[in-house]
Amino acid sequence: MSGKPAPTADQLLQQATAWWTTSIIDIHPGEIAVRGYPIQQLIGELTFPQMIWLMLRGEIPGRAQAKLLEAALVAAVDHGPQAPSIAISRMAVTCGLPLNGAMASAINSLDDIHGGAGQQCMELYQSIAERIDAGETEEKAVELELDRFIAERGKIVAGFGHRFHPVDPRAVKLLALVREAQERGDVSGRFATIGTLIEKSLGRRKGRQIPMNIDGATAVIYSELGFAPPLGRGLFILSRSVGILAHAAEQTQQGGRIKGPMPPQIPFQYVGSPLRRFEPQHTEST
Amino acid sequence: MSGKPAPTADQLLQQATAWWTTSIIDIHPGEIAVRGYPIQQLIGELTFPQMIWLMLRGEIPGRAQAKLLEAALVAAVDHGPQAPSIAISRMAVTCGLPLNGAMASAINSLDDIHGGAGQQCMELYQSIAERIDAGETEEKAVELELDRFIAERGKIVAGFGHRFHPVDPRAVKLLALVREAQERGDVSGRFATIGTLIEKSLGRRKGRQIPMNIDGATAVIYSELGFAPPLGRGLFILSRSVGILAHAAEQTQQGGRIKGPMPPQIPFQYVGSPLRRFEPQHTEST
Amino acid sequence: MSGKPAPTADQLLQQATAWWTTSIIDIHPGEIAVRGYPIQQLIGELTFPQMIWLMLRGEIPGRAQAKLLEAALVAAVDHGPQAPSIAISRMAVTCGLPLNGAMASAINSLDDIHGGAGQQCMELYQSIAERIDAGETEEKAVELELDRFIAERGKIVAGFGHRFHPVDPRAVKLLALVREAQERGDVSGRFATIGTLIEKSLGRRKGRQIPMNIDGATAVIYSELGFAPPLGRGLFILSRSVGILAHAAEQTQQGGRIKGPMPPQIPFQYVGSPLRRFEPQHTEST
Amino acid sequence: MSGKPAPTADQLLQQATAWWTTSIIDIHPGEIAVRGYPIQQLIGELTFPQMIWLMLRGEIPGRAQAKLLEAALVAAVDHGPQAPSIAISRMAVTCGLPLNGAMASAINSLDDIHGGAGQQCMELYQSIAERIDAGETEEKAVELELDRFIAERGKIVAGFGHRFHPVDPRAVKLLALVREAQERGDVSGRFATIGTLIEKSLGRRKGRQIPMNIDGATAVIYSELGFAPPLGRGLFILSRSVGILAHAAEQTQQGGRIKGPMPPQIPFQYVGSPLRRFEPQHTEST
């Protein structure tokens, strides 16, 4: 496929091998090592959250850290059938999709707005932490970065406020767990503090409580544990996948064929061109 | 990764090249040939339906055949925002997905029930045609294969009946086009006949009209044109993708964030366990 | 949209509410209850596998049962970048997809063949268990159902044999954990026995070892724990999602744009029509 | 689910109806109107590209405009099995996915980098056109906006250059068609001119030819025809879906189970931690 002097077969083969390079897993006949550990030594020993951490970061976390990660994963599994991801999952199985397909269509929708809030919130926290590290006071760092976030992304600050919950019970509990871990010395607590300061600042700015929501609270935990922001989205997906699966399975039990978003007896609203007659000559010129 | 005597680099390279084998397209620097034709000779000459046919079947169809294919593709583009595929597409963009992502989540749902009806209907038609070819009368062949279809797949016969339209205006028009093409000698018309006989038989069986729907009518056309049944699903997807795209684009214009299936003011219904208190010791034994 | 006597607004509203019915989760402002438990009582108390179980089955499992589930979830997270699901995930991020999109495209591919093996294997185990319950001997039940499975699905028996591993170290470890749990009385062990008998029968049939693989071993665990077969696929997806995420994240770090399956220097093989000239009149008739 | 004074059932119902609002399609029993036209008047009359245009933009284009759109749709259907979207599609069917699933996983990957180039290129063209409209000379407008594009997005300018083709035969042909249409007065030709000026500027900047590629050429056509940039991505997807479908169908014919990106005889490269022993106490503290 090319006029250039061809590399040798050995060179091409080496390129092919290098094309798929990983530091996550090594596999030989009868042997599987994850991050260097023979997998049979991990099975039955590691908790699932520890395995998630090992896969994503290369080392096995301590139990205290893993417990915090676990709490965050437990907290975000579901928010009801009217969340679009869950609704998509349920509609999908009524179109004939097996669980993998329903989960795929649903997980796909956990994009910037629906699933990326945690990631954005982690970026906000970490930009504030960097300012503090550079010598800014906590309050000033929060104000400056909040201003920047709002200027760049609009007035909805990822991780704070909820259109449904005046207070998000998941966030309250998760924050309490972080503070307990801080007291035991398991985490620094600095991101919990940053999150709380943002909450206060937003309250002052808007003149009403804009409490931390589940995304803001899990972002505190993932930041305390040292995860990079894009992994915040990834961890949320692992968690919410449980709800997506459970709802798809429940809908399969309930049955239904080609389930739309509302009962078909409720019409949609058409606001387009009134009825008109097609004249074939329409298409002869613009 | 193996203890076997390794093949030579040349052999492995040949295996790698053969791993991706196609008869659809050949590419060399500055040259692209589709089914043997330099692509620049096709652009501006072939209609889009002709190109679809060439890609799927290897040869360029005549204009009359391509026009029938075109009519079927035009007919199935959309069936409103309450079709789950369309609703998924619209909800997805409000979660942050770009058009490719919204289309993916939606197209995925065109599975056996929502998108596979045309394919199943083509299989039914072709099983009837095979019985006729084997000497059975048309009526007998229809009865036998209808019985078998219903026994295997249940009472909803793919391609017939519609929960919304007493008569499907798309099917009526498409059938008329097939009959015109038959008169001109462009198609045999045998699948139109088979479809009509099924419609009659279903009417007798149920004591009311079960008219051919869009899937039944496009299945007639795709069968007349010689497409294999799985491609019936594929062609439907190409057609419905237009509606999925148009609705995703319209929703993007309308805006909205994390749009659920119904307005959030309308609650969902919870029918599970009443509120209960978690006792940590619950988890100590089953 | 209909000529029928319209239901009242109250009736329609009730239908809309009932359209989305669930027993999984209830949500009110400031309150979220999962299977009846206020979520803040579960966060920090339940392990992630316990939460998965609660979501899927409605009750909180005992710790011993949850540990077995956890072992299975830990075991199946990854099988290297050449598994198509993982390769898809890695290629996808180089096309611009964020983690949710890469995970969606990859998870989608965990279909009947790649992700459904565990489900099929559970169905096989359970059909054998039913025969035993009906009075058949263990050996006879295994032979009869294996014969049926092979007749219906072909000679590759889901859950047994591996094209790469002579012995799958994950399966060995998981089976050992089941036997330990059996000794403690936490599970019955009957599915471990059934799996072992299938392994022996396949060895006799083929004249060589066809050892249980990861799918066969997780199917033992999920069956011991009472999961329905379709959830076997779902649990595998939750597990493999971890690997899909880790590889997508690693590829993001490695960079790359529009990464194909092999280095572009290695050509694909074209086996179609030789180069030919397009004559526009081709399209005038068939 | 709320403590606020509840709206009446009629109000809620109106909200539900308005929740799904469209100007694309209206449906009543026995009647389907697309953009106001009864669909049976369009079937058999409109070409598929005309229907695509009508769905996306609300009006039926003239034949000359539709022919240009058709040429662009024909041109971009495929670029071989090593394009990641095509490879994903082919691997997916070997995992058990039907055509809809394979197409979904593949189309999903047509994101910013793989499928968004045309959209980005249209944005570049249109920003240049706006500068010209504001009084800038063509050359100056091109330089300024190219500088901005490169500053914001990096040195790879969407729509120009190809890692494989020194000259892209599709682009050459499409540009020729635009110029012919311009001579007939069907389009203005201004975006063809802008594209050509970018090509020249890039050649000067890099000291070698960076010719317009398929994305640059289709972006010229879509801009000449007045499409908004996001629809450029959408139209590309409609076109490339044909190749994705054709390759998925061909792979189904070829067979294969769980096809990876390279033959399994070619290993991947592991570059992670050397083999190490897991010590359970690792997990007691960080």
Image (cartoon, coloured by chain):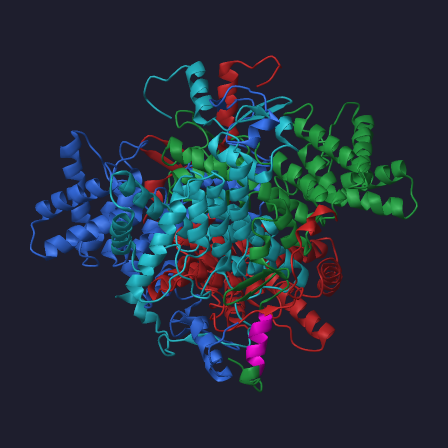
Chain colours: A green, B blue, C cyan, D red
Query: Which is more toward the observer, B60 or D182?
Result: B60
Question: In this orientation, does residue B33 appear?
Answer: no
Name the quadrant containing residue D159.
bottom right
Which residue is most to the front? C183
Q: Position of residue D44 (x, y in %)?
A: 32, 49
In the image, is residue B200 part of the stretch drawn in magenta?
Answer: no
Which secondary structure dominates the residues rendered in magenta?
A: helix
Task: Reply above or below: D220 against A246.
Answer: below
Q: Quadrant of residue C97?
A: bottom right
Q: Is residue B217 left or right of residue C224?
A: left
**Which percent across, then down, holds residue A178?**
75, 35
Q: Is residue C7 visible?
A: yes
Looking at this view, name the residue that lies furthest to the bottom.
Answer: A5
Q: Nearer the viewer, residue B248 or A271?
A: B248
Which residue lies at the image location 74% right of the left edge and 39% below the top edge? A220
Q: Is residue D242 above or below residue C46?
A: below
Q: Is residue C104 left or right of residue A225?
A: left
Residue range of the region highlighted in magenta in the rendering: A11-19
Q: Give how far across and how far down residue A222 sits, in percent.
A: 71, 43
Vertical comparison of B265 with A191: above or below: above
Is A14 within the magenta?
A: yes
**x 41%, y 42%: residue:** C223
